[in-house]
Image: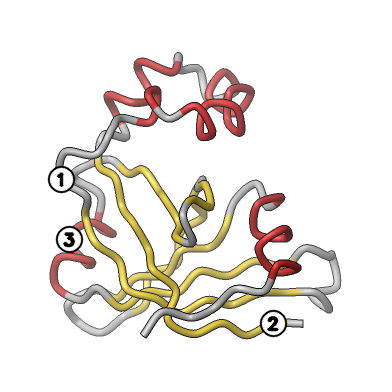
């Protein structure tokens, strides 16, 4: 059953630049990775390289967590447990206006264009929240 995200948490999520995305490897070891994302239709949309470990992890175990602290002392944080799916046939990142608007500067900073970034990070991941906790 999907978790409900309060309007306050939704606004904090939208304003976060990245989240820590944790998947679980086949040997049971958690694998946290910082990722770019957008909050869209009550889900997280994340793009990844198709050969990334997180893609293999999701294919074996769709249970994931996303977390971030929006203060330096972590007094204000959100942790979201969810289920991830690989979205075959999803639009590439450079075809998603909200994603481009949020990360245009970041894409430049890593020496890519929107087109080259979309080609390298061509696998879309959709995370549906199941449980949310935070302060």
Label 3 sits on residue = 56
Quote the CA–CA distance across marks 3 and 1: 14 Å
Left or right of 81: which side holds 27?
Answer: left
Q: Is residue 61 above or below residue 131?
A: above
Q: Position of residue 121 (x, y in %)?
A: 32, 34
**Which disc, if any, is residue 134?**
2
Q: Nearer the viewer, mark 2 or mark 3?
A: 2
Q: Nearer the viewer, mark 3 or mark 1?
A: 1
**Mark 1 residue crowding within 10 angstroms, few (<14) / some (14–19) / many (20+):** few
Q: Of helix, strand and loop, which one carries label 2?
A: strand
Q: Nearer the viewer, residue 67 or 86?
A: 86
Q: Is residue 56 above or below residue 31?
A: above
Q: Position of residue 71 (x, y in %)?
A: 83, 65
Left or right of 86: which side holds 83?
Answer: right
Q: Of helix, strand and loop, which one carries label 1?
A: loop
Label 1 sits on residue = 88
Which callout, 2 or 3, points at the residue further toward the start of the chain? 3
Which residue occupies 30% across, 30% down? 92
């Amino acid at each position: 059953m999907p978790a409900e995200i309060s309007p306050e948490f939704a606004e904090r999520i939208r304003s976060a630049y990245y989240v820590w995305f944790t998947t679980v490897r086949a040997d049971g070891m958690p694998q946290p990775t910082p990722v770019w994302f957008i909050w869209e239709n009550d889900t997280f949309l994340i793009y990844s390289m198709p050969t990334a470990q997180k893609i293999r992890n999701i294919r074996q175990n769709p249970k994931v967590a996303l977390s971030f602290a929006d203060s330096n002392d972590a007094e204000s944080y959100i942790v979201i447990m969810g289920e991830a799916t690989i979205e075959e046939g999803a639009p590439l990142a450079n075809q998603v206006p909200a994603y481009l608007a949020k990360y245009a500067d970041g894409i430049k900073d890593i020496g890519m264009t929107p087109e080259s970034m979309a080609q390298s990070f061509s696998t879309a991941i959709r995370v549906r929240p199941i449980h949310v906790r935070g302060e």
